[in-house]
Structure formats: structure tokens, C-alpha cells
Amino acid sequence: MGFKKDFFWGGATAANQYEGGWQEGGKGVSIIDVERGGSHGVERRIDDEVLEGVLYPSHEATDFYHHYKEDIALFAQMGFKTFRLSIAWTRIFPNGDEEEPNEEGLAFYDRVFDELHKYGIQPLVTIHHYEMPLNLVKKYGSWRNRKLVDFAVRFGKTVMERYKDKVKYWLTFNEINALLTHYRPWHQGGLVFEEGENQEQTKLQAMHHQLLASAMTVKAGHEINPDFQIGCMLIYPLRYAATCSPDDQVITREKMIPVYYCGDVHVRGRYTNTCRSLWKKWGCRPKMEPGDERLLEQGKVDFISFSYYQSNIEGATDMERVDGNLVWGGKNPYLKSTDWGWQIDPVGLRVSLNNLYDRYQVPLYVVENGMGAIDQVKEDGTIDDDYRIDYLKEHIRAMRDAVDIDGVDLMGYTTWGCIDLVSAGTGEMRKRYGFIYVDRDDEGKGTMKRSRKKSFYWYKNVIKTNGEEL
Ligand code: BGP
């Protein structure tokens, strides 16, 4: 019993927060390249263009672009079976609307995948992770515009064709449903709402375009290489009813509707009653063209991957609200929180796995989980991140229960930010998730030197024992 023999242990990152090299190899300007602020109470803001003399955290991030060999060697030392990374759209199509891809960008990921295979590490590739050419926002209004479907499918097909013998596992859109649940739709959809705009209508339309692009990419991928395993990626902000009042159950269920909206289309290939109930609630629905339903039907995913960080409570009465991964939710008196107020709930991961498996009956993959914390480097250079070990240990234990006791089909586990990188939510460096420390701070200072934290050695043993020794 326990985890499968070929369970994918590893770590997860994304180009927009990790890669840096923002102007290298013909890369175009991405939506993340004009976003700044966030740390130490400085408001997060989006500029129209890159301004001189301003620190944009993504520009260098933690510089995977120049450190990939060193970083992959460290992942290999931990025994990673897989490594989740995303491909920057702006490296392949710098403006998004070109006919031909940028060869230098494609060659970069060839080198990265070759390096991973050198150590027997399977890449797990997210095609869209909070990153897109800024040009597509300015010229076309981003995902509001149906043209984005063609551009995105061209990008997806290009990378799947190019890496068909190097990458088998793919995810289309990171946390796709965050566009519906999310209070900051810039990351997931490159959207800034205009005054008076019907935001709900725009979100549903942009979402329809992304779901179409996803389905068409899945279909193309299966034609390019029938061995491909292509999944979706959902944000899973678990919620419990605050009390046993029936009203609280109804409200809690309703809160989860945007979460299942995308899972339903990805897995069932159509808009379900759950989706339609959101249209009713919002009083609008996406415009569709003839043939769209067929396209959704043809692009069903092979598995569901998701991120899980915390749970919250919901109910009819007022309650204290706390922060979480892109959500606000009720504070649960039974749970402790991280320094950023995200409630720590390992059992909730088991609940989430069961919820998703009961509903969809397709293999699941936990591709993000972890604890953002401030790490202290001691005088001798060591970093004792026992809090991170405790967090991950309890979550792995809960996953094991879901597998062993509940019979959930689980493919793998990639912890978020296995090496320190820039926070998506706050733009901070001091909010660290890694097993590997990177010497870089919120002011953009530091040598980028990598060092192993205590959790590095702990995770190495977890992988070695296939999750038996925690
Ligand atoms: C998810 C994103 C990641 C990542 C993570 C942690 O929403 O997919 O990109 O950043 O959350 O969030 P944060 O960086 O805000 O701590």
C-alpha cells in the first residue's frame, strides 16, 4: 500500500516568477514584466509599459534562465522524479500574434528538457501560467477577444510539436478557474476592467475562450503524440460550512460553483447544470459560436491537477475573514495560520482529494502545495525550516490517507516553489517556499547564490522512501 511505485515526487515553479532573463533570447514583454510593488505594504501596481529605474520582481526573479543547470542538479540530488515548469509564451511568440515562433526561445527549453532527462527527471509543463504577451492585452483586449483562442492554440501546438519526444505530461492553464474566483484577474486573464464594464460578462466570455483554447490544445496534443497525458489545473480553495445550519451548507456549496465550473467543462466536455447556475446567478452567459460545443467535447482532459494551500469557512452570518491563495474566506477557529494568514489544514487536502475524485473519477495530481514563510539564514549559513517540514509532512500524510484509506487515484505531488521564487500574490521575495534558498531580497539585492535548507535533506528522504518516512 501507500503511494504508487512510479509516483511523481517533485517540485513546481513557473516562468513568470522564477525564470528572469526577461529580455534574453528575443523574449517579448509579458504582463508580469509591468507589475511591481506588493512587498512591505507597497501597493501592487500595473504599469502601461516598463519604466526606467523601477524594480520589477519578475525581470530577474531567481534567474532560472542562467542557473538552470545548477538548479536541476540540485533537484536531482533530492531525487526528483518530476519537475513542473511553465513555458513563457513571450519566449516563443514575443508579441503573441506572430506567424512564426522565436527559435532562440524554443532552443532554451530544449536545453532545459535535455538537462532534466540527463537525470531521469520527467518535465511536467504548464503551457499558460499567469503569463502572456503584453501586446495581446494592448492590441486585442486580452482574453475578451476570440482571436486569443487562435494565438493560444498556435502557441500550444508549437510547443507540443517541438517537444513531443521530450515532454509527455502537460497542463493547459494554471488555476484556470481563478479567473472566476479571483480578485485580481490580471494574472489569469490579462484583464483590467473598464469603468462601467459588466465584469461578470467579461469574465465568462474570457473564460469561454480559455476553455476553448484548452480543449483545442488537448485535442491537438493527443494527435501530435497519442502518449501525451494532458491535464487541467484548478485552484482548489476548500470551504467548510461555518455551522451545521442548512443555510450555511447551501452558501458553502454556492461558493464552490466557480471552482467546479472549469473542472466540469474540462472533464465532461460541456457546460453542466453547475455552470448554468452561475450564469443564472450572474445574469449573463458567454456568447458561443456554432461548433464550440463540439470543440469542448473533443478536448477532454486525461487528469485533473490542482493547487491546495488552505481552507476557509463560509456561512450566512458575518465572520472574520482572512487571506488565502487568491481568496478571502472565513476564519476557522480550529486551524492555525501561516505568517500570511493562510490557514493550515492538512486534513483539508484529504477532503479535497475526495471531493474531486468522487465528482470526476479521473486521476488527480497535486501540483502545488506549500508554505510561504520568512526563512532565517544562520551565521554558519544553515537554514532550519522545521515549520515547512511540519507543514509538508502533515499534508503528505493526509494524501497518503486519501490514497490508502479512500482509494483516490493520485499521480504525484509537486510542492510549490521548490526553490525560492517571487510570490505571485504579493510580488515578495521574503515569502519563501523552497527547499533551496536563493540569496535575493525584496529590494532586488543579493548574489543569487543557492543553498540547501534543512527541508532539502528531509524531502530527499521522503522521496527515497516513497513517502514512507516522513
Ligand atoms: C498559486 C500560483 C502560483 C504561486 C502560489 C503561491 O496561486 O499558481 O503561481 O505563486 O499560488 O502563491 P503566492 O506566491 O501568492 O504565495
Image (cartoon, rainbow, N blue to C red):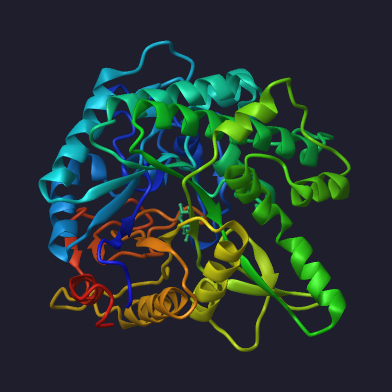
Residue 39 relative to residue 123: left or right: right
> Where 446 falls versus 369 (above or below)?
above
Of residues 276 and 323, the one drawn nearer to the viewer in this rendering: 276
143 vs 357, nearest the viewer = 357
Q: Residue at x 41, y 24 (%)?
A: 157
Q: Position of residue 113 (x, y in %)?
A: 21, 39
Between residue 264 and residue 97, name the one nearer to us: 264
Q: Is residue 317 visible?
A: no
Answer above or below: position of 295 versus 15.
above
Q: Position of residue 95 (x, y in %)?
A: 45, 20
Q: Residue at x 44, y 36 (%)?
A: 33
- Name the spot of residue 64 as percent of width and height, x first: 25, 45
Q: Is residue 355 above or below residue 292?
A: below
* Res 91 visible: yes
80 sits left or right of 119 in the view: right
Residue 391, by quadrant, is bottom left
- Position in image of residue 353 (x %, y %): 52, 68
Position of 444 relative to 80 (above/below): above
Residue closest to the far bottom: 334
Quadrant in the picture for residue 435: bottom left
The C terminus, quarter of image:
bottom left
